[in-house]
Amino acid sequence: MSSLTADMHNRLTKIDRRFVRLGIIAASAYLGRIGTLVVTLVTLPIARHTLSADDFGLWMMISSLLGFLSFADLGIGNGVLNGTIAANAKHDQQALRKLLVAGYHCTLLIAVLLGAAGWAFADHALIALGLSHPSAPADLSSAIDSLRIFIVLMALNIPASLAQKAQLGMQQGHWIGASQLLTALISTTLIVLMPRMYITVPNLICATLGVQLITNIVITFVWLNQHMPTPLFEQAQRIDWTTHKNILATGALFLLLQISMAFAYQSDGIVITRTLGLSAYGDFALTQRLYLVISIFLSATLLGLWPTFGDSLARRDYPWARRLLTRTALGAASFAATAAVILSLSMHWICQHWLNGSLTPSVGLLVALSAWTVLEAVGTIAGAFLNSANLLRPQIVIALAMAGGAFALKWVATPLFGPAGAVWATFLSYLLIAVPATLVILQRYFHTASTP
């Protein structure tokens, strides 16, 4: 028995600690993703049957803006993430504190300016998004109020969620999972217990994004109290201009990259709403959310991948990083393909039992979303590696070319083929532009890295 125990102990000690950390982050992230899934499964049917078709489309459109406006922090969050990875690899607590102070200085300023601008120009934003035409909700003032509430809460969440970037960079992703799970539980409880007469777009935004803001603030204070021996507010008045300059320079590159990706991946709502109407977008977004479940669970598994790549590259362990890149890309593609096929075959049953038959997505849309889900899974792996390697400029060139092609093609394909046309436009642009260019960049990077 003792020899068996010793053998098991030896095997466990041989497991690469980077895989262990990756597994711990993934396991904790599943809790948060399960919570997000519960919110989706509970909230969407309630909103679908309580709101009018146009109000439901408005809520789905506003919800999708969270993905589209991922660049609202001007790339500061990802700049903090990369900086944290480097500081953590060197065990440099002073650099980490300077990084967080600079990050909070920048994001607080962004939050104030964005919130004020959103409040003042919400009506103009409605016009730009195509939400103020005759098919929009009858109560235009309610739509403006909804957008204002969303923008203010989203802006405040920029500094409130900054600590999550540092947590991820320090490979402490379990904090993020706990925060997401707590947010999901509170949001779901509020929406389930809310009287149907109060199920409105503004209230749904407060019950989701507002709860997220409060949870992020509480978790941030708890985490900082445990991991920052010297309180940040003692350093807040000491501005380290070098750190600010570095974080803004890195953030600017991420900003260009995120804007390009937003127009390539997240612009479906704008195009479909303006060409087919809010009601059509509501049906499309509902179907798309089901496929996003696959991406949600896949992203939980791979949450720690970016800092894991960064740590291995900082230690110049290129062969290990290359093996991890290849294996995770193949694994992600296999998982996404299997899950997408199962989901597509089950779609009729899901719509009948979950939505009481109020939605019947076309076969063409299901095929398009399945194909994109697989390609997106592989792209997520490649993007995590390129980001960790600080290969941002080539990514920007690729993203700009792809975004231009995808966004232009969507305006042509959507009126001809319906919502599926917008998905195929993104798929084809990525396949023809991003995939070949990314393969070339990776080949050159590993060739240069392996050269003495």
Image: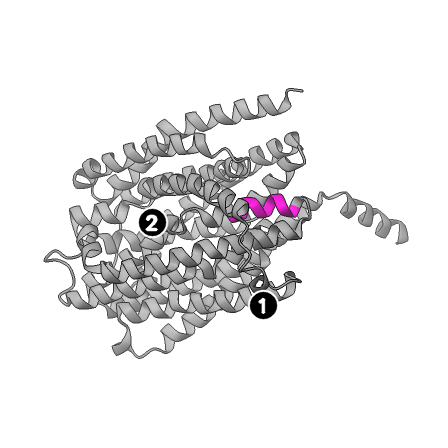
Residue at image position (34%, 35%) is 427
Side of 68 relative to 51 (left or right): right
Checking the image for residue 170, the label placed there is none
- Between 235 and 369, which is closer to the camera in this rendering? 235
Q: Residue furthest left?
A: 134
Magenta segment includes 83: yes
Look at the image and tell me in which quarter the C terminus lies. Answer: top right
Mark closest to the chain's N terminus, 1 or 2: 2
Quadrant hosting residue 41: bottom left
Residue stretch in magenta = 80-88
Find residue 432 and report its image quarter: top left
Q: What SS does tag 2 mark?
A: helix
Please determine whether, in this image, residue 364 is positioned above or below residue 183. Answer: above
The N terminus appears in which quarter of the rendering?
bottom right
Task: Give residue 428's position: percent from left, percent from top.
Answer: 32, 32
On the image, the x and y values in percent for residue 372 come to 37, 40
The label shown at residue 68 is: 2
Residue 356 showing in the rendered view: no
In this figure, which residue is indicated by the disc labeled 1?
A: 222
Q: Is residue 319 above or below residue 271?
A: above
Pointers 1 and 2 in contact (CB under 8 A)?
A: no
Alpha-carbon span between mark 1 and mark 2: 30 Å
Q: Which three-letter amino acid code belongs to the residue tagged 1?
A: Val
Coordinates of residue 383 in the picture (x, y in percent): 48, 38
* x and y, in percent, of residue 236 in the image: 54, 60
